[in-house]
Amino acid sequence: MTGRSSAVENINQMHLVRLISMIPGPYYLGWALISTAVLLVSFLMLLWFEKSLLYLDLFGIISIIIAMEGLIISWAHDKWDLFQDILLGIVDLPREDIVKLSQKQAAEIFNDPKMIAFALLFILLVHLVGVDYHGLSFGSDISYFAFMSAYYLAVYLEGAGLYILIMTALAVHNIGLLPLRVDALYSEFHSIGMIYSKFTICAAMVYIVWGIFQIVIPLQFSSFQIIAWFSGFAIILFAYFLLPQYSIHKMMISTRKERFEFFSSQLRAAMDGPLEVPTDENVSQLKDMLMVQDKLNKMSEWPFGWRELLYISVIIIIPLIIILLEMALGIAGL
């Protein structure tokens, strides 16, 4: 059995992967079907027990959140092979050691018992803080039970996703502690940054949908509690995005410095030829090396661009702006 197949077998034990694999087709279709089923059952129950579709919008938002969170978890699981390939290209260790390291990281990130425990503790935290009190009035206990079941499923998936976010951040940080190959391509460092940035953007999009949900339900929090809750998550997302990638940033600086020193020694040796024998071939070779040196000077030292940073900033700030506007309009009596 190859190292990759062992790693895949290991992380495939995750209960959410097993659940979605029971549905024929790709994982995104499976989560879309699950969220659609939740919405459809909610629609029928509201018609039957409530004789009203008053809270159908809340069920719809919860269904969207379930689909988004499930997609992100499955996407992270699906991208692990690519992460291992990148490690093989940048880490200066024997292939067998890198594969073992990748398996160890996968076992931690997709550790089923720890993920379940973390998700259940997250549900407990939500309950203790009082976030799960929505002030809704259902005519039937069955309708209320259905709503809370869908809500806690979304919270459970959020907790599972948060666990993967934390463990992924630690994995990215640990890469900076490994010996790196001097000939590693900058594109491979950027690949880590791009995957990580996409993961953060997906998490931020779930955050904004939760913000919409919080706005739609009857207002139960005080102004300070709402701002503190969403500001806290905004700070966590920014920290999640920036801090682990700082390790990649240090890696890129170190690799660039070593490569620049190696190239400078080659350039000094190459300059002796054109100066002593200025042939067209020697001059052309020197120009090529000077162009390479110029590219090294212009290489980015961060694994993400301003576009990714702008996307995340806008996505995180929008819910806070909406909440502040709602509060302002409420104070103005509009």
Image (cartoon, helix red, strand yellow):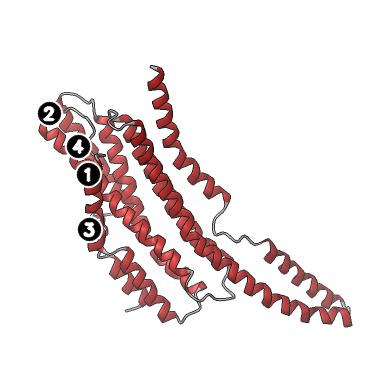
- Which residue corresponds to mark 2? 49
- Please state, as top left, top right, bottom left or bottom right, where the C terminus lies in the image: top left
Packing grade of label 1 (10 A; few <14, some 14-19, many >=20) is few
Residue under the point 25% across and 35% down: 59
The amino acid type of the residue labelled 3 equals Ala
Mark 1–mark 2 Cα distance, whole angstroms, equals: 30 Å
Mark 3–mark 4 Cα distance, whole angstroms, equals: 23 Å
Residue closest to the far top: 333
Residue under the point 18% across and 42% down: 149
- Which residue corresponds to mark 4? 147
Which is more foreground, mark 3 or mark 2?
A: 3
Of the numbered discs 3 and 2, the one sitting upstream in the chain is 2
Mark 3–mark 2 Cα distance, whole angstroms, equals: 34 Å
Mark 4–mark 1 Cα distance, whole angstroms, equals: 19 Å
Mark 4–mark 2 Cα distance, whole angstroms, equals: 13 Å
- Which residue corresponds to mark 3? 117
Relative to 138, is 20 on the left or the right? right
Give how far across and how far down residue 166 sits, in percent: 36, 58
Give how far across and how far down residue 291 sits, in percent: 75, 67
**What element does badge 4 sit on?**
helix
Give how far across and how far down residue 256 sits, in percent: 62, 69
Of the numbered discs 3 and 4, the one sitting upstream in the chain is 3
Give whichever of 46, 318 is nearer the camera: 318
Up the image or down, 19 lies above or below 219; here it is below
Relative to 151, is 206 on the left or the right? right
Give how far across and how far down residue 181 sits, in percent: 55, 76
